[in-house]
Amino acid sequence: MSTAPDRSNLLMIKGAPFNAETPIEGLRQELTPTVLHYVRSNFDLPDHDGTLTIGGAVERPLTLSLAELRALGEETLTVTLECAGNGRVGLMPLPTGEPWTGQAVGTATWTGVPLRRVLEEAGPRASGVEVAFTGADHGHYKGGADIHFVRSLSVARALDPATGVLIAWAMNGEPLNADHGAPLRLLVPGWYGMGAVKWLARIEVLEAPYQGQFQTKSYVFEWPDRAWEPVTAMRPRALITAPVEDETLSPGIVTVRGKAWSGGGPITAVEVSIDGAGEWQPATLAPPTGENIWQEWSFDWTLGQQEIGRHVVRARATDAAGATQPDMPEWNRLGYGNNAAQVLVVYVR
Amino acid sequence: MSTAPDRSNLLMIKGAPFNAETPIEGLRQELTPTVLHYVRSNFDLPDHDGTLTIGGAVERPLTLSLAELRALGEETLTVTLECAGNGRVGLMPLPTGEPWTGQAVGTATWTGVPLRRVLEEAGPRASGVEVAFTGADHGHYKGGADIHFVRSLSVARALDPATGVLIAWAMNGEPLNADHGAPLRLLVPGWYGMGAVKWLARIEVLEAPYQGQFQTKSYVFEWPDRAWEPVTAMRPRALITAPVEDETLSPGIVTVRGKAWSGGGPITAVEVSIDGAGEWQPATLAPPTGENIWQEWSFDWTLGQQEIGRHVVRARATDAAGATQPDMPEWNRLGYGNNAAQVLVVYVR
């Protein structure tokens, strides 16, 4: 394994397996430094032999070294990644699972080889329907059998050049560190992070849909009032990065600013609401700098003497698919995808 | 008016009219010092001539000085008072009104004369159905007519010795200060604070129910899905006073503690839940020290090395009427009575 990652700048949620959120100050830059990027791990750091095997319903089963993967071509993508459980603490009754508040998100550059090139090397058979990705990480899940973290994608999605699915070996220009999946991880741009299998060890083309724990039991929206759905694309969300909760502001023009992203397409509007029953007012929104990258937004708030006191600031985003963040969280049993508009209390003095 | 109250220790919500919440450290004592007690004002501080008039459907209209009120007998009650809008910020869509988080509550001793003695002096006529209480405070409510803050009680409630309704001139052993209604205010033990009319200037026995703004338009639960109800008794609530939000705790035994109260009778149980889908575990609950006074509770939480990380602590109370705090706020248009169980995020390091 690589050297121990620097975890000292993160808000630790759990020590083993290591899970940690980014402090709000770490979310103000366009790119999130690796030492500030949130970490989600299902199991303890695994050993990994440095190779990737591709098997199952393929013409040419392969085992590739990092050098062989590099030889297939290298691309660098900038991707905003958000934990599916981000915002779980806003759901009541509180679901089990890591208590993410709202900062399990980050944007990094990822360098690797497009998944489709690797699959094409192996030649998926026509009988293949899904591609399963196995991480080297494993453990006795909830006290049960020793299982690996495995996720799948449809063959169509895995081969589609438009999806940008990447097998990455570098993050922000450096080799992946252990917390981010060294030596190899998947990236599924636009989806919540559960698709981005870390410590990727094996790819298998399947002739039937994959039914494992992390595909059909975890990462499912168990809605109380409608059919369950798999967790896939990130729902639109605006994050306020300044001011911060309980901050004291001075009269004058205060710029409320933050990031907004969605897996449903670019963000087309961010709106801000000040205090109860306030109108939603348009924020200034930067155009996207690429696909699946958060966008900066800002809102100039004029504070006069009559604003001395406490105020409630909210922000919400709308994406190109027309989805807007709700006022209230949408409860689901496992606590995924809470994209209710953020509520921030500040003081003017 | 009395000298300017010391507002420096409070979390100011609005400067004019002055509204302020208690910092959490101010809620750890059994009695809340006056300088730390929350303040709710609908209008700016009024002038008050120091007398109380009693009129309307009474045999003997009266104007009483403070000395004459004292001569009717003096009682001291300890009362927990909570703003009807306490917790409003937890309701979404966010209602208009002061953005109280959850610390608009306090317990003080109040000295005055029971309301019924004053009413008996005046002799309510048999035709009286309600008693209206007019504060000297007034203003152009939402830009409309200049109105006073007026609330009413039924004659039966006003005369019932069991309700303990008090006309108070002292708080915590000192004359009322301007923010708390000097020289006279009503206290309606067990009810949210809107009944506790400050700067009380006039009492009038009415032969028809009072229909003013603060009786029939404000302080009404406008439920989206059922008949509207007037806001009256405080709903059960447990407040966590230690640890505080985002506090870092050390392994060992940490005592989670707080207060719990209800207008529906004494608190009979407080329960604590740690993390998602945790069982509700019983806290140790102190017996009531009197009617309508909050009760202390505590819960010893054992933190081992495996608890290193972030945790979510919740507390909920049940009162003698069997009412238990809900997990989720019950939304109502004006944002009253949000007694959803508190959610506190802490770290163990």
Image: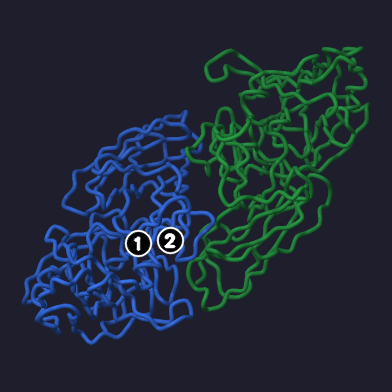
Chain colours: A green, B blue
Q: Which residue position holds label 1?
A: B83
Using residue A118 as the reference point, say whether residue B36 is left or right of it. Answer: left
* Image position of B314 with respect to B2: above or below: above
| Amino acid beneath label 1 | Cys
Farthest front residue in view: B127
N-terminal of the pair, mark 1 or mark 2, is 1
* Image position of A267 with respect to B187: above or below: above
Q: Residues within 10 Å of mark 2 (few under 14, many from 20)?
A: many
Q: In which chain is the residue bearing label 2?
A: B
Q: Residue at x 38, y 50 (%)?
A: B339
Task: Depth check: give the residue in front, B315 or B301.
Answer: B315
Using residue A241 as the reference point, say whether residue B70 is left or right of it. Answer: left
Using residue A300 as the reference point, say whether residue B199 is left or right of it. Answer: left
Discs 1, 2: same chain: yes
Q: Position of residue A315 (x, y in %)?
A: 63, 57
Report if residue B106 is visible in the image: no
Q: Position of residue A225 (x, y in %)?
A: 57, 35
Q: CA distance from mark 1 to mark 2?
A: 9 Å
* Image position of B284 with respect to B234: above or below: above
| Amino acid beneath label 2 | Trp
Q: Residue at x 17, y 69 (%)?
A: B173
Q: Position of residue B243 (x, y in %)?
A: 38, 46
Q: Position of residue B317 (x, y in %)?
A: 32, 43
* For the residues bearing labels 1 and 2, Cβ distance under 8 angstroms: yes
Q: Which residue position holds label 2?
A: B100
Kindly state the secondary structure of the residue where label 1 is placed: loop
Task: Depth check: give the residue in front, A45 or B139.
Answer: B139
Kindly state the secondary structure of the residue where label 2 is placed: loop
* Image position of B103 with respect to B14: above or below: above
Q: Residue at x 46, y 43 (%)?
A: B346
**Which of the 4 image quadrants contains residue A79?**
top right
